[in-house]
Amino acid sequence: MTGADLFIVMIAMVGGAIRVSTPFMFVALGECLTEKSGRINLGHEGNLVLGAMVAYAGSYTTGSPWLGVLMAGCAGLVLGAMHGWICKLPRVNDIAVGIAFMSFGTGLAFFFGKPYIQPSAPRLEAIPLGDWTGNSSVAQALQVNPLFFVGIALAVFLWWAFRNMRWGLILRMTGDSAASAKAMGVSVDLVRLLATAAGGFLAGVGGAFLSLFYPGSWNEGLSSGQGLMAVALVIFARWDPVRCVFAALLFGAAGAIGPSLQSIGISQGYYFFNAAPYILTLFIMIASARSKGAAREAPGELSIVK
Amino acid sequence: MTAVVSPPAMRSFSLGPKSARVVEALVIPIGALVASALLFSVFLIALGKSPATFFSLIWTGGFGSSFSIQNTLQRSAPLILTGLAFAIPARIGLTLIGAEGALVLGGFTAAAVAIPLVTGGIAPFLTLPIMALSAMLVGATWIGFAGWLRHYRGVNETISSLLLSYIAVAIMNFFVEGLLRDPASANKPSTMPIGDAYRVGSMPGTSVHWGLAAGLLLAVVLWILMTRTTFGFAARMTGGNVRAAKAQGLPVGFLVVACCAIAGACAGLAGFYEVAAVHGQANASLVAGYGFTGILVAFLARQNPLSVVPVAIMFGALAASGGLIQRRMGMPDATVLVLQGIIFVVLLVSETFYGRIPFLQAKTTGDRT
């Protein structure tokens, strides 16, 4: 591999990390919001796939990709609200409900998505940030979607709100100790319902990115576990929205290894590199599961870390 | 979780609470099925389709003729095995959803092991058991690893087992598209076909392969293991309360890994039958969602190995009638997925009714709810 090749691979990795990380970022932020309230939603894979389908269909029907993004968010919101409502029933296990919504969301998306596999819908436009360099591969890598910046802004806002805003504090209190929230007169179920619904909205938007920007089409193999990896990512980021962004970028880079190497003609082991994000997630989970820091920062009510 | 452990002392105490519990465990899941069917009918009516046609087609496609019954049984064979693969770890308190990966990897291993044996001309009666054993061993290791991570490293088993599933599919793709690709498989990369002489045949008098018999046998064996042996009692006790089990000096780590390994072996065996009896080679067809449907099967069977069998046959019928529904009603193949999703969600909602329906409760005070 020559120096020039290495440069191309590096640039492709950076561009790939930005592109691939955006859906991770949205799902992770949604999951972070949900988990901060003390509940876990494993069903974001379903939200992601349904969001992708609804966004594509919405963009195709209305001609406006941003309307598609909004509709995807609303589809995710509905799934999230259903999840939140079911989990508040006694004796119902939130992890099992997550698995059920994974298959329910995916089933709905495949059912209604059939007619939209062929037609071409208007996509989201990218902001060309690298044109001034005059280097074509740099320019291509820096075609950044506005949603990427929305995600970062949202992460910073959530980080700030968890510390400084009234609802942020109530949310964290509910997640750390339902008993003290009740003692303060807060409706625990309502807080968790709203948090799960809002989290579902964000996961739906993440799905819209998949179908409307990168890879940028709707088909049934569009998402393969991103929604689930994002849950692991939140644990790795220790429930901190800003750290979620960095973790998402790391996952994005891992996902971009295969395609980047392919861009300079190395296609051997493509399937092995495809597995890189899953292997990375597993290693990260093994490394962070028993760490004292993670245990200290985890919301006290979360079933997954108990 | 859903695994309700009834201590043996309670059983001999009186029959009342137990029979009430059995009735409850029948009425609530059946009620959930009826409610899902109603919800799905509303969904169909909203789309302008006839629910009556739909359900009668499921009956025709699943049980209407001897051909469709055999088709149903053929499809329920892997579902019994993957249902067991979810149910056994569930009894010890684990939510493992990685059966899909163990099935794929087990099937791939069976096909890969077969290549040198078949080209070397080893007789089928030696080759097939070696294929089956290696598939079970790989499946057991794969899921056992998730159990090991859970117990010794504190890694959440639900997420790790699903990640392992994706890794398993990637491993199969890596070899099937590369080293072990049969050059003759142009459009659909596959391993070398094992050949008709090495296929697992049908059970006498039917066209259903032996995987069904293996599933039935394992269901009975695992039911005995989980309800009639010390191992099963220790496992269920661990599922009920890990701390109490540890305090009693039970080998919790061994029990957890063993239950997961049993689960993985079941799923791996399902993969073996998919390769040796259905496809004849390993390719992307192995990733058919049997592992995920198995989760639903086990939930509906309330993690009871024996109940897994009829539930698996029901979902086998649903899968078998999918093609008929597609042709006759012009609905996509994902229709079955939607119905399964609705059943799954409604079933979990129904969990909330245990111990809360007055006329299903025992009159004695010995019942703990």
Image (spheres, coloured by chain):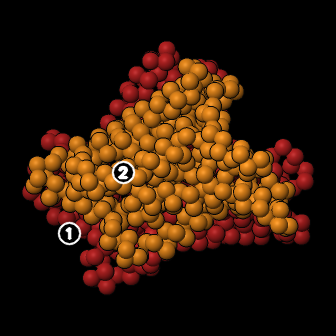
Hue used for the chain lettered B: red
A223 sits left or right of B116 in the view: left
Up-down: is A233 above or below A210?
below
Distance CA(mark 1)–CA(mark 2) = 53 Å
**Residue lying at the far top of the rendered structure:** B48
Q: Which chain is orange?
A: A
Where does the image place residue B251, in percent across and percent down from the top left?
A: 39, 82
How many C-alpha atoms fall within 10 Å of the one at disc 2: few (<14), some, or many (≥20)? many
Up-down: is A5 above or below A204?
below
Where does the image place residue B319, in percent across and percent down from the top left?
A: 58, 37
- Chain letter for mark 2: A
Is residue A90 something that shows in the picture? Answer: no
* Residue closest to the eye, A271 or A150: A150
**Residue lying at the far front of the rendered structure:** A132
Where does the image place residue A152, in percent across and percent down from the top left?
A: 48, 50
Using the rendered view, name the quadrant where residue B113 is placed: bottom right
Where does the image place residue B6, in percent across and percent down from the top left?
A: 25, 63
Secondary structure type for disc 1 = helix
Name the residue at 79% across, 55% down: A262
Tag 1: residue type?
Ala
Asked if the residue at tag 2 contacts the one at tag 1, i.e. Cβ–Cβ closer than 8 Å, the answer is no
Secondary structure type for disc 2 = helix
Q: Tell me the quadrant of the picture where the N terminus of chain B can be found.
A: bottom left
Residue B9 numbered tag: 1
**Where does label 2 land, which residue?**
A158
